[in-house]
Amino acid sequence: MIGGGQLGRMMVSAAARLGYRTIVLDPDAACPAAQLANETITAAYDDREALERLAASVAVVTYEFENVPVAPVRALSHIVPVFPPPEALEVAQDRVVEKAFLNGTGIRTAPWRAVDDAPELDHAFLDLGGDCILKTRRLGYDGKGQAVLRENGTHGEAFDSLGGVPSILEKKIAFEREISVIAARGQDGSFAAYDPAENVHGLGILKSSTVPASVRPEQAEAASAIARAILDKLNYVGVIGVEFFVGRDGELLVNEIAPRVHNSGHWTEAACTVSQFEQHIRAVAGLPLGDPKRHSDCVMENLIGQDVERALPLLREADVMLTLYGKAEARPGRKMGHFTRVSPRSAP
Ligand code: ADP
Ligand code: MG
């Protein structure tokens, strides 16, 4: 496992339950996944010698976040199977490449323009019209690396405020709701998708995921079909998270894809027999995919920063599954844990 954050931790735990041993490579010796893995390699993600040591010791390599440098991972894939494929990393790492890939696959997104300097931003802003969001092409997460540009406001500082790096300007979508689909593709090309979750963000960070989402069955099916088209096109193996905007007229636009297990899929651990974490391990290990069916309705909430103080009383609630990530310090904006409250499944 390259990367040892909470996603890695939950995958390591799922792997252990299936009888596998894991080695985690992360620059931080005390990272959340290191506490559970059989072995750890403390090294930078692009440390070739460390990556080769990892490759020499394992049957398969996977990763828990999309900012692993592509070149060393691609080199690794010649020595040992790497899933999801490095092409998926390449697409998901750069918002311009990602949008071009999606549109090229016939999938709709927010209208967008690549922006490499301040004059280009002026043109793109006029061109798209209305409120827009400027995002860095690379390395953004949890709403970081983004600036909102108001239709009638000034935006002279916006490009520099994000560091003057290659960026993308997107039209701000007046969406009705946000949903996501967590889907998986096996080594045999099999496909499984969980029911869409309805997601609420605060300051760009996921606050809660509710399942079922308030979408019509046809919309849920359409979202799942889009996820499937993405997986097939990438010849993907593993779990993917696909984030959507649902427009006021019910249209589906893909916001972004994450080539890994996803925060908006944490609910699967409490409301499905096979969680997204086990599903990913099954896929990369070449096992049959699990049935993604859901036995309960549920709401997952993140515990961010000082929210972690809410954890203790939750332990008294019979319908709540609590997960803490083993992070020592509760910094503001840092994901410390999450909990899922289940309720009986509503009639289908
Ligand atoms: P991150 O990588 O930080 O998750 P996102 O592109 O998903 O970046 O942006 C985070 C959140 O910001 C989205 O879930 C959504 O709520 C809001 N957002 C992002 N892009 C747009 C857009 N084009 N229109 C409206 N809201 C957006
Ligand atoms: Mg997002």
Image (tube, helix red, strand yellow):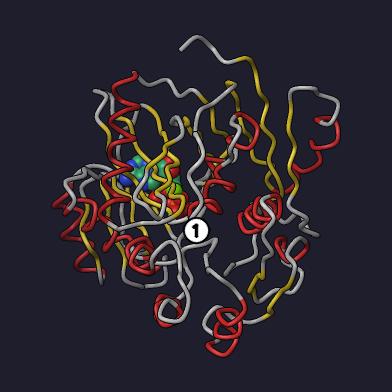
The residue lying toward the viewer, choosing from 64 and 274, is 274
The residue lying toward the viewer, choosing from 108 and 189, is 189
Furthest residue to the bottom?
49
Q: Relative to 44, is 37 above or below?
A: above
Q: Give the residue displayed 43% in from the left and 61% down from the top.
A: 84
The residue lying toward the viewer, choosing from 224 and 256, is 224
Task: Give x and y (percent) for residue 70.
Answer: 40, 75
Helix, strand or loop at label 1? It is helix
Residue named by callout 1: 284
Q: In which quarter of the image is the C terminus?
A: top left
Q: In which quarter of the image is the N terminus?
A: bottom right
Q: Relative to 341, is 240 above or below?
A: below
The type of residue carrying mark 1 is: Val
> Does residue 222 appear to the left or right of 67 in the view shown?
left
Q: Give the residue displayed 63% in from the left and 35% down from the top.
A: 301
> Does residue 154 appear to the left or right of 144 in the view shown?
left
Q: Give the residue displayed 31% in from the left and 43% down from the top.
A: 228
> Does residue 234 appear to the left or right of 45 in the view shown?
left
> Does residue 125 appear to the left or right of 224 in the view shown?
left
Task: Give x and y (percent) for residue 21.
Answer: 69, 64
Task: Give x and y (percent) for residue 74.
Answer: 39, 77
Q: Give the residue displayed 19% in from the left and 66% down from the top.
A: 120
Task: Give x and y (percent) for residue 150.
Answer: 31, 45
The residue lying toward the viewer, choosing from 148 and 290, is 290
Ligand 2 lies under 8 Å from the Cβ of mark 1: no
Furthest residue to the top?
347
Q: Relative to 79, is 31 above or below?
A: above
